[in-house]
Image: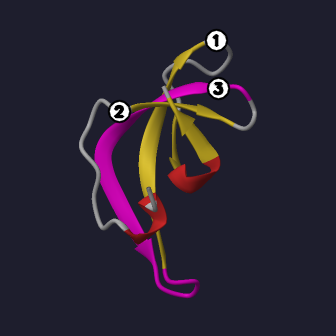
Amino acid sequence: MAYAEMTSVEAGLRFKTRAGLVVETTGVSLHIESVEVNVHEVVIVDGEGQGNKYLHNLDYAEKT
């Protein structure tokens, strides 16, 4: 699935990033016009940095 092409994603989806972090979508999305990509806000749900939020291109994460 091409999340970078999706203008929004539902909250509560869980992914594992390339760095091994387990994150969950918050439902907030942002279009990066300069590269024509959509990124989605995630919150770290387990481990180091738990509770921190950041924007992520979910095409580079594995859905869990």
| Residue at the spot 41% in from the left edge and 71% down from the top edge | 5
Looking at the image, the residue that sits furthest to the front is: 1
User: Label 1 vs label 3: CA separation?
Assistant: 7 Å
Q: Which mark is residue 13?
A: 2
**Where 39 sits versus 19, above or below?**
below
Q: Find residue 62 and report its horizontal and vertical position in percent.
A: 57, 37
In the visual, does 44 lie left or right of 29?
A: right
Q: Find residue 15 and report its horizontal and vertical position in percent.
A: 51, 32
Is disc 3 placed on a helix, strand or loop? loop
Is disc 1 placed on a helix, strand or loop? loop
Q: Are marks 3 and 2 in contact (CB under 8 Å)?
A: no
Is residue 17 inside the magenta stretch?
Answer: no
In the visual, does 33 lie left or right of 22?
A: left
Q: From the viewer's perspective, is the residue at label 3 or at label 2 nearer?
A: 2
Q: Find residue 27 and report its horizontal and vertical position in percent.
A: 27, 45
Q: Which mark is residue 47?
A: 1
Mark 1 / mark 3, whichever is N-terminal: 3
Looking at the image, the residue that sits furthest to the right is: 19
> Where does the magenta region start and end?
20-36
Tag 2: amino acid: Leu
| Residue at the spot 48% in from the left edge and 22% down from the top edge | 51
Mark 3 / mark 2, whichever is N-terminal: 2
Q: Which residue, given by chain and number where applicable, does mark 3 sit on?
A: 21
Looking at the image, the residue that sits furthest to the bottom is: 34
Answer with the quarter of the image where residue 31 lies: bottom left
| Residue at the spot 50% in from the left edge and 83% down from the top edge | 36
Tag 3: amino acid: Leu
